[in-house]
Image (cartoon, rainbow, N blue to C red):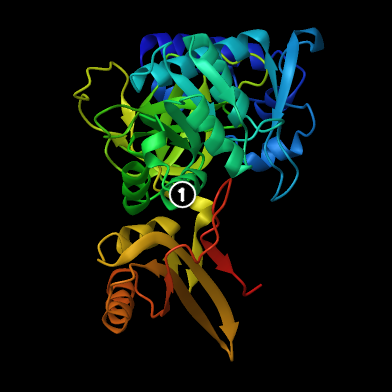
Amino acid sequence: MKQEQLHLIQKVLNHVVQCDGFYQKKYEGISVCDIQSKADFKKLPFTTKDELRDAYPLGLQAVPDDKIVRIHSSSGTTGTPVIIPYTQQDIMDWAIMFKRCYETAGMTSLDRVQITPGYGLWTAGIGFQNGAELLGAMTIPMGPGNTDKQIQMMIDLKSTVLCATSSYALLLAEEITKRGLKDHIHLKKGVIGSERWGEKMRRRIANELGVQLYDIYGLTEIYGPGIAMSCDYECGMHCWEDYLYFEIIDPLTGRVLPEGESGELVITTLKKEGAPLIRYRTHDLSRFIPGECSCGSPYRRIDTIIGRTDDMVKVRGVNIFPGQVEDLLKTIEGTSSEYQVMIDHLEGKDIVNLYVETEPSCDKKALEQDIKHAFKSKIGITIVPHLVAMGELPRSEKKSKRIFDNRY
């Protein structure tokens, strides 16, 4: 923790305990004046998403009503949505961070940025737009869906940057290849976020679109996308530590882990006014990458998100994460990036069916055995592999669901 970060944390703490709201109640009995070091800070309790849900609708608000200019919200698909209020300064700070993301990817005001993530209460689309406009780039705010129109605008307006989820980027790449339009597009870069994606999917999108890909990170509770970004060297994402303080913890014990060890990412906002968050548990799994980046950025790096603590399913006593399946499949020749895991409980036991797209020329019988053996030896359970043709599994314009647990 840098000294300037500590000063900002102390300022935030002194402010939130004076507001009649979430943190005043949470920190009752805690003397925030005693937070004088990193060791003191680590004694503060974590903030969880369930607490944010309990604060619905505006319990997180830490400034008067006349300072709030916008709200965003989580989807609420798994419970009560989380409402995050923003001040005008919050909007500007977010745009500054997003502009920095684009600059980290080598973008300039001469780029033409096609934005396909959703608009509305979700933070994605408007975040990409505000950053691109602050950069001075031409912004093409398409939003999700209508693939025919997306491709038409991409060709006619000569878009140079595609902003998308990995699932929708793959769908667009496949459609462009299928229609023989690769020579008609002008894309140079792809900024991809919102979901984890494996190396095979990355290579397919990059090759089919002819672009260099960049990972962008963020979450609705902490501004939105744009709080960390990969560079040309593709070795983790630089995180903007002048606006945010990052920690990696053991998700089971809450112990702060040393640099290089993987765990759950915890974030504290240093300048956010509308809804400051202190030691917020993101559920995202990552690690700090030791050493300096070859790009020369002064901002340290977190690794590409390897999964979420709440993505895990347990089968026959074995924990399975989507990232494990992706890491396994990338080592097996003949398999695609696209897969689905279906878990059912039949006749008193759990059955795991793995559906995976494969290259047309593969030896299906041998490939089935390779997948079955790899799953058993590397993950620890027996599965039933099902090889399907390329393009047979559903594509998504948003995030792709990979694991379906049908037991409950």
Image point (32%, 74%), residue name: 371
The reply, left or right, for residue 302 in relation to residue 401 is left
The reply, left or right, for residue 347 in relation to residue 81 is left
Q: Position of residue 115 (x, y in %)?
A: 55, 29
Image point (32%, 76%), residue name: 376
Furthest residue in direction bottom, as rendered: 347
| The quadrant where residue 129 appears | top right
At label 1, which amino acid type do we have?
Arg
Q: Position of residue 310 (x, y in %)?
A: 54, 53
How busy is the neighbourhood of tag 1: few (under 14 within 10 Å), some, or many (20 plus)?
Answer: few
Image point (31%, 26%), residue name: 231
Assign a secondary structure to mark 1: loop
Q: Looking at this view, is 83 or 201 the one in front?
A: 201
Residue 396 in view (yes/no): yes
Q: Which residue is mark 1?
A: 179
| The quadrant where residue 299 appears | top left
**On the rendered image, what quadrant is the C terminus found in?**
bottom right
Q: Looking at this view, is 230 or 107 the one in front?
A: 107
Number of numbered labels in the structure image: 1
**On the rendered image, what quadrant is the N terminus found in?**
top left
Q: Position of residue 196 (x, y in %)?
A: 44, 47
Q: Looking at this view, is 371 or 248 the one in front?
A: 371
Q: Position of residue 206 (x, y in %)?
A: 33, 42
User: Quick check: 338 above or below 61?
Assistant: below
The reply, left or right, for residue 260 in relation to residue 41 is left
Residue 43 in view (yes/no): no
User: Quick check: 251 above or below 318?
Assistant: above
